[in-house]
Amino acid sequence: MSNCSPSRPDRGPAAPPRGFRMTLSTTRLLALGTIAAALAVTGCDKNAPAAKTDTAAAAKSSDPNAIPGLKDDKARVSYMIGMDMGQTLKQVKDEIDIATLEKAMRTQLEGGKPLMNEQQAQQVREAFSQKLQAKRIADQMQQAGKNQKAGQEFLAKNAKAAGVQVTASGLQYQVLTPGNGPKPKADDAVTVHYTGTLLDGTKFDSSYDHGGPATLPLAQVVPGWREGIQLMPVGSKYRLWIPASLGYGEAGTPGGPIPPNATLVFDVELLGIGKAGAAGPQPAH
C-alpha cells in the first residue's frame, strides 16, 4: 500500500522541510555512493587483470553498453553522475549559478583552494536552508488557502446533488451499491477495495494498483474514512467526499501527492469486517 492510503495516521502539522544541507550532502556523496555500489557488485577484486577496451568497438551497436555521444565507460559514468546531480539540484535551479557551481566542483576535485572556508560555507548553507524553508511554508500557505476555498465551494454545491448525504461533521457520501451485511465499529479492521482522487480527478492511491484488497484498522485511518466506513454495510460500495479537516488537513502529505487542505474523493467497497490485530476480517457471504 502506498504512503497516500487512508491508513496513514500522521495528520499533525507538516514536518519541517529538510534543510538544504541534506541535499548538498546527498550530492556530495553521490559519486562515492555510485562507485561503492559498483565495487560491491564486482567484489572489489584489485588483483583482477585490467580489461582492454577498444573504444572504437564500444561505439558499435553490437556493444550493449554503447550510447551515442558517450564513447566509453568513463563518459557514461560521468554523464550518469551529472544526471543524478542535476535531478537533485533541479528543485533549486533558480537559486544557483551553473558556472560558479562548476568552478567550485573543479576546485574541490583538483585539490585547489576554495574561495570560502568551511565556516563560511556553513553560514551560507544555513541561510539558504532558512530561505528555502520560508519559501516552502509561504507556498504551502498560499496553496492551502486556495484549496480550502475550492473545497468549500465544491462541497456546498455537491451537498445539493441527488443522493448525496451530509453528516454532522461535514462528511458527504453517496450509496453506489447497497449492502445487507453488518456495519463495522471504530475498533474493527476492514477489508476494502478503494480508489482515492483529488477534486480534479487526479488519482493518488488505489487498492487495485496494489494487487488486491487492503485490510485497515479503522483506528489508524483519517477521521473522514473512519466515519464513512462505519456507515457502510458489508457488501456495499460508497463514494465519500472528505473535507480537508477530516482528511490530511493543512499539512497534506509533505513530499506526496495530496496537497494542503485538499478535499478527497474515495470510492470504497466494503468486503469484510474483523477485529484489529486478529487473523483477518471475514468476507461478505
Image (spheres, helix red, strand yellow):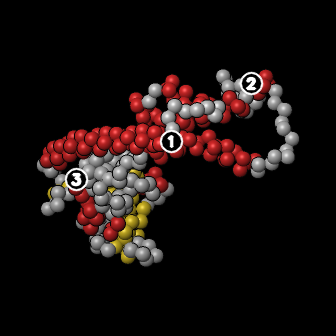
Which labelled disc corresponds to residue 243?
3
Left or right of residue 262: residue 35: right
Nearest to the observer: residue 272 or residue 277: 277
In the rendered image, residue 164, in percent from the top left (x then y), is placed at 18, 53
Q: Looking at the image, is 136 positioned above or below residue 214?
A: above
Residue type indicated by callout 1? Glu
Tell me the crowding category of disc 1: few under 14, some 14 to 19, or many 20 or more residues within 10 angstroms, Cα based. few
Of the residues tagged 3 and 2, which is closer to the observer?
2
* Contact check, label 3 and label 2, Cβ < 8 Å: no
Which labelled disc corresponds to residue 118?
1
Residue type indicated by callout 3? Pro
Looking at the rendered image, the quarter that the C terminus falls into is bottom left
Helix, strand or loop under label 1: helix
Residue at image position (34%, 73%) is 188
- Mark 2 sits on what residue? 59
Looking at the rendered image, the quarter that the N terminus falls into is bottom left
Helix, strand or loop under label 2: loop
Write down the quadrant of residue 125 in the picture.
top left
